[in-house]
Amino acid sequence: MLTQIHRVTQNGGLYKRPFNEAFEETPMLVAVLTYVGYGVLTLFGYLRDFLRHWRIEKCHHATEREEQKDFVSLYQDFENFYTRNLYMRIRDNWNRPICSVPGAKVDIMERQSDDYNWSFRYTGNIIKGVINMGSYNYLGFARNTGSCQEAAAKVLEEYGVGVCSTRQEIGNLDKHEELEKLVARFLGVEAAMAYGMGFATNSMNIPALVGKGCLILSDELNHASLVLGARLSGATIRIFKHNNMQSLEKLLKDAIVYGQPRTRRPWKKILILVEGIYSMEGSIVRLPEVIALKKKYKAYLYLDEAHSIGALGPTGRGVVEYFGLDPEDVDIMMGTFTKSFGASGGYIGGKKELIDYLRTHSHSAVYATSLSPPVVEQIITSMKCIMGLDGTSLGKECVQQLAENTRYFRRRLKEMGFIIYGNEDSPVVPLMLYMPAKIGAFGREMLKRNIGVVVVGFPATPIIESRARFCLSAAHTKEILDTTLKEIDEVGDLLQLKYSRHRLVPLLDRPFDETTYEETED
Amino acid sequence: EKEELIEEWQPEPLVSPVSKDHPALNYNIVSGPPSHAIVVNGKECINFASFNFLGLLDNPRVKAAALASLKKYGVGTCGPRGFYGTFDVHLDLEDRLAKFMKTEEAIIYSYGFATIASAIPAYSKRGDIVFVDKAACFAIQKGLQASRSDIKLFKHNDMADLERLLKEQEVEDQKNPRKARVTRRFIVVEGLYMNTGTICPLPELVKLKYKYKARIFLEESLSFGVLGDHGRGVTEHYGISIDDIDLISANMENSLASVGGFCCGRSFVIDHQRLSGQGYCFSASLPPLLAAAAIEALNIMEENPGIFAVLKEKCKRIHKALQGISGLKLVGESFSPAFHLQLEDSTGSREKDVKLLQEIVNQCMDRSIALTQARYLEEEEKCLPPPSIRVVVTVEQTEEELEKAASVIKEVAQEVLL
């Protein structure tokens, strides 16, 4: 059985460092077995639904009120088929409640289910010291001690918790101004603006920047917030294959040459939406090529660095620094404070005109509450620490520790024989599971061994490519990583997860086909 | 030839330049906490602009609870609810909110705007019909846009207009019964409207609901913690059973003086959002210190149900005091803590109106009364309300301060407008 690893390497001197990304193809036998597995589950699903309908089996889920039984039903039966029959079986792997700081080790509240996951009961026990491979804590700032926490506590005492007003009215505190100046300095751009929620940053600012008559070129695997923002803007959306520069170039050429679909008028603006690190694949965007294309075709680039800010680059400035590029080339740099800074919220950085425009036209500045002051202080302190402005070298050490952890972890997993997706330098490590039964089994086995992992299946990933996703952190010491690796090894043998065939077939790029499609808003 | 086309094409600039004196460009800078005595642009004022209805922004108990949570959990949650981002504080808060509102379940979001904007598209999809009031706030409008449903606007608080639309829909249904059987209908209203300060006629709405088989989504951002004997909102105010409302959504940024929002209702309705609410599944959860602050605020609300009557009293007082100002008319109910002062005769151009009102606001600030204009995105709103000054009443304002505010506004209005 021929398996191919599509290995992508340097491309024409744009890259100053080797770009090693690998997506090993699914072995055929595994793919077939996965489909069979889902087929069996679907059959059982229909059987159970039938039994529930005829009341042979007890119906556990909530039902509509008696008075409203003759209203049009709120949910379509088919919509929830997947939830009722597949998701419910392995529901205990998600929404695990914790009761401590989400650092390298975490305390999970134990849950028991007496009726096959339809309802949970808390036993009152707490599983202590579970190794946390699921939280987005890249630089280890999720701490309840230390300078960040002390500063945040002081600001809480002084300012209180809420703000109760929007930025444009009376909710613009001096702390927000301080934060924005610092963010601009951190990114190396002229100005920046901060918002209360990372998801909302995308969904509220993309509509402010583009509208009808503009074109958005968005990557296949973009996050829900980018997709929602693009849809709300009313522009035409075209999707290019994940990280595939030929696909993007073709779309750009066609767009400029043929113009808008029916009227053939030229497009007003073209906006390319990409992410720094894609959280489900672990791949890093091919930024040098994207910037070269953007300059050639005069498009605008919107870079969402939710996962890559703080995690990539020698001083943690993100994917732009990782590739050694100029931050001025990226028109709109967006990111979130949730992952590497241990707080919450999002920001957008760019030229001063852009930020002035957003201050007046962003939906969030007019209608949504501004950031809470202790959260702002946490961001300020952690950012100063990463930049080294607080006088210690703690920031630099964290960034380096994360890079070392990433390299080590990925190398060891590959040696063991697992299929790992993504770029060698990305701290997000997806380990392929494929089969639906293994999703549940992997999650539960790892929890038995005191390691908390995140497993994802459909619909967040394509139906046969379910995976376990590890998020590495600078807070993980080598002992923690070694323990984890040992346990993964055992579980991998137990569940037969070591699919990798390691046969190298050098190819320039993943092939793509002509299926690009267009989505217009009414 | 294609190369030439590529060379020739010039895009528009990414953003149009913003003039330096755009009214919204230069924000007021507040130094220090936005509490009752607020320092805006260096001037000390009494705060009549932040939505701190119950005065919980400065409350030491709330701060202490948040501090304890900060010491235990740190600041951020580093993950969405599905992936180790669910803390026991979140579960606690959801439980408390459900018990307080006397519903089966509640779900919390980390951002007030995202609450209703994610809740509506989770239930209403393409092909469904939503009847919404013209004065609905921007978050509702964005939720409706994301849902891609058919939107039918009815005149503000006009039940006859709504009934007319519902009747028309019924006629359509007779023509195509198969389609009608799968088209869901929703009515989206706010308890106290942010844009006008008026209350929705909930008893009539419930009657229409059962007559025409539409579900009601009630947005209670302004009325939660304000109306009703115990602060449970507009359903308690009218004495309607809470089960009649399918979904109540509110943000915790007004009375509860925290950040975030919640939806509450029956489990049948709320549980769906745990997998299909975009702002819930794809976004990091609420920082635990904010959740702890909200729990403590709820405790305070439950312990002193007397503050709601006090707030109502103060609202009525200032409402009476601000009647009859020459040039400004008061828009809003007498018990609404956030109401608007609009120009009686508009100058004809919105820009001039905005400038006049800003002049009034600036002068009031010089005399240490902090007010603000109600801000809107002019190009994006479906039904743009006229420019106005928003006055907010809180429990912390004393009677002298209320009197002073009323007289200052009267004086300034006289000077500027005549």
Image (tube, rainbow, N blue to C red):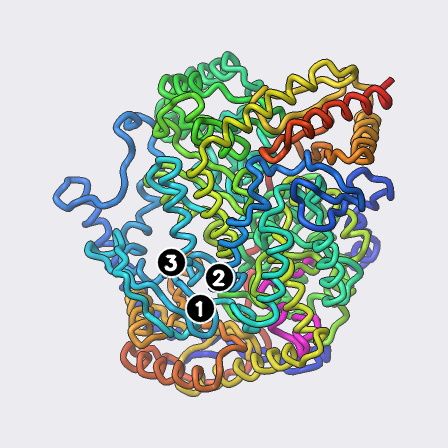
Confirm or deny contact between disc 2 and disc 1 (CB under 8 A).
Answer: yes
Label 1 sits on what residue type?
A: Gly
Farthest left residue in view: A56
Which residue is more in the foreground, A30 or A489? A489
Task: Estimate how packed mark 1 is, as few (under 14), some (14 to 19) or many (20 or more) residues with alpha carbons within 10 Å.
Answer: many
Chain part drawn in magenta: A302-322
Residue ID at (55%, 76%): A423
Asked if residue A91 can be seen in this view, the reply is yes
Q: What amino acid is at disc 3?
A: Asn
- Disc 2 on helix, strand or loop? loop
The answer to whether marks 2 and 3 sit on the same chain is no
Residue A320 sits inside the magenta stretch: yes
Q: Secondary structure at mark 3?
A: loop
Horizontal relation, residue A313 to residue A64: left or right: right
Residue A22, numbered label = none
> Which quadrant of the view contains residue A107?
bottom left
The residue that label 3 is drawn on is A95
**What is the distance, in whole Å, between disc 2 and disc 3 at their CAs?**
11 Å
Measured as percent of width and height from the top left, residue A207 is found at 66, 45
Crowding at mark 2 (Cα within 10 Å: few <14, some 14-19, many 20+): many
Check disc 2 and report the residue beneath it.
B79
Q: Quadrant of the N terminus of chain A?
A: bottom left
In the image, what residue type sits under mark 2?
Answer: Gly
What secondary structure is found at the residue carrying circle 1? loop
In this rendering, would B325 be left or right of A456? Answer: right
User: In this image, B7 relative to B331: left or right?
Assistant: right
Chain letter for mark 2, please.
B
Residue B365 higher or lower than B208, as above or below: below
Residue at 66% of width from left, 57% of height from top?
A347
Q: Which residue is mark 1?
A: A134
